[in-house]
Image: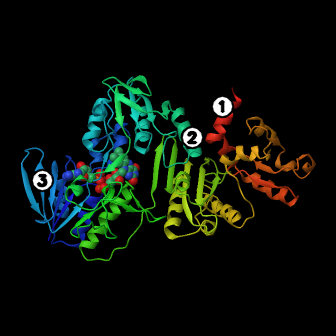
Amino acid sequence: MRVVIVGGVAGGMSAATRLRRLRDDIDIVVIERSGYVSYANCGLPYYVGGVIADEDDLVLQTPERLHERFRLDVRVATEVLSIDRDRHEVTVRDLHTNAESAIGYDKLILSPGAAPVLPPIPGIELALPLRTVEDVTRLREAVLAPDQHAVIIGGGFIGLELAENLRHRGLRVTVVEAAPQVLGPLDPELATLVADELDRHGVTVLLGATVEAIGEDHVQVNGQSIAADVVIAAIGVRPESGLARAANLVLGPRGGIEVDAANRTSDPDIYAVGDVAQQTDALDGSATLVPLANLANRQGRTVADHICGRAVREVPAIGTAIVKIFDVTVAVTGWNEKRLRAAGRHFAALHAHPGSHAGYYPGAQTMALKLLFDPVSGEIFGAQAVGGDGVDKRIDVLATAIRGGLTAPELADLELAYAPPFGSAKDPVNMLGYMAENTISGLCSPVQWSDVASLQAEHFRVLDVRSRSEFAQGSILGALNIPLDELRERTSEIPREPLIVTCAVGQRGHTATLLLQDHGFDVVNLDGGYQTWSHSPAGLAAVAQQSK
Ligand code: FAD
């Protein structure tokens, strides 16, 4: 049997090596268009910044080593031009000699990845994309002097990783983002924390800004010309499904190749994995695209297993991702609030600002943590975190909980490793579980930052139970300040109107809410407290208004 694989990086190489481990008698041919195989595409931004100093460190394998160990026939600088499904062969071109030839296959695995989106902006050909080792070499060559100005189009994961790395090289950096926030997978009240971090490190971020044209030494953004020595396109990716389309394989609405549970396409002898394959969303079963390395590697293995007659199982995609932006870690899993709203889903949101570990042990860092879940069934829809230490651990636990089908209150039951340098006896994930249980059981009904203005318009009064000094540093307009510890003695001062209680992060507010409910007040707690509100679009707008 001969298996031909298109694309020799994450999904393709995972399939190739698994196949070889399972069977030594298969003829395995890997065709890779770039000059490198099995390279660390996720490491490319760090090579731009010099954090990864040696280009060789990006190249995890060579065709020679892969042949030596796995007897793989790896052909780099070779492009698959077309698929002839009837004849079971692909036409390839050697990019050095331009010679074309046909290679027959019994099974074909497509893992050509995703191509950078390059919108039809005049001069877009001057913008450098970042996908391959060749791209990163071009980018390194373009980034010559620290006094240069780089403009990055796109404030997503790769754009921001590049912003950090170019600052590391000393360049001035501007990120141009069409959306009103950076990092689309985050909800806006968490994305502002990332924008603050970029600002702190000298990155200019233009939000709601569109690049209209790119010239040799400038870009035009919202009608203004900005000088630019280097322009980078990091606008997103689209599945590289041209070969599949030309071969009449069935594609989904967003251009990904439709596959079954074994990653088989509409042709049973052709498989598709990784960024090019359409995924099934774990939450609603819809067709989705999740261009991340974990899925590509897992699916490469799945396909090898299936070809070798082993049982495989369908694993829908949750979408779990993490990124480092200077000193901040951002991680997400599942759906965000924007997507839940757009889909018309009924959901509850909870915000917490716990420490990475016990506060009394040195070095604890605060993180912003958000959980989204079904307020009736408790099904976990998604989570987001922005902070330092421990963000990765919490999001990974929450992703595991989603995969395992735990409900939000059941997060309280997780027995997580604890000692003061690592966590808290009530881990942040357990805390989310307690909070969710309080919400679902009706013990309290938190309101969100986005509800404050409309509730105030309905004559809710804001009662801030932080200390006087905390209150003096900033508060919600019209708030009455009575510190929590004085509340019992001063209930007579509290107006008998509906109340929104707030504190710094929602914890003292929760205690105050239950106390006041017990005293007959009509009261709701502001979820995530002043900290969440003040970083939200509503809070930022209110603060800007006050300072005018
Ligand atoms: P790829 O790994 O992209 O491999 C596809 C290969 O196919 C390419 O080398 C391409 O040259 C080749 N090819 C395409 N068409 C043809 C053809 N016709 N003939 C021959 N060869 C062809 N994901 C994460 O989870 N975490 C990260 O931190 C992360 N960081 C990233 C940073 C960067 C700069 C980039 C570009 C991606 C990053 N990703 C990250 C995404 C991750 O790399 C991809 O999801 C993953 O590599 C997809 O695997 P794949 O096999 O589908 O495609």
Q: In this view, does 155 lie above or below 413?
A: above
Give the side of residue 515 with respect to residue 287, left or right: right
Which image quadrant: the N terminus?
bottom left
Which residue is depicted at the point 51% across and 33% down? 201
Image coordinates for residue 275, horizontal then vertical, percent: 33, 55
Q: In this view, does 359 lie above or below 223?
A: below
On residue 521, which mark appears? none
Sequence-earlier tag: 1 or 3: 3
Q: Quadrant of residue 444?
A: bottom right
Image coordinates for residue 488, horizontal then vertical, percent: 89, 53
Residue 425 at least partly seen: no
Image coordinates for residue 76, horizontal then vertical, percent: 17, 50
Q: How crowded is mark 3: few (under 14 residues within 10 Å), some or many (20 or more)?
A: many
Secondary structure found at label 1: helix
Q: Residues within 10 Å of mark 2 (few under 14, many from 20)?
A: many
Image coordinates for residue 432, horizontal then vertical, percent: 63, 60
Which image quadrant: the C terminus?
top right
Q: How crowded is mark 1: few (under 14 residues within 10 Å), some or many (20 or more)?
A: few
Q: Mark 2 sits on what residue?
A: 192
For label 3, being within 8 Å of ligand 1 is answered yes
Label 1, label 3: how many angstroms apart (C-alpha)? 59 Å
Which residue is depicted at the point 48% across and 44% down? 183
* In front of the other: 458 or 119: 458
Q: Please, what is the three-letter code of the amino acid marked with disc 1?
A: Ala
On residue 92, which mark appears? 3
* In front of the other: 55 or 148: 148
Q: Which of marks 2 and 1 is in front?
A: 1
Q: Please, what is the three-letter code of the amino acid marked with disc 3?
A: Val
Q: Are marks 2 and 1 in contact (CB under 8 Å)?
A: no
Q: Mark 1 sits on what residue?
A: 544
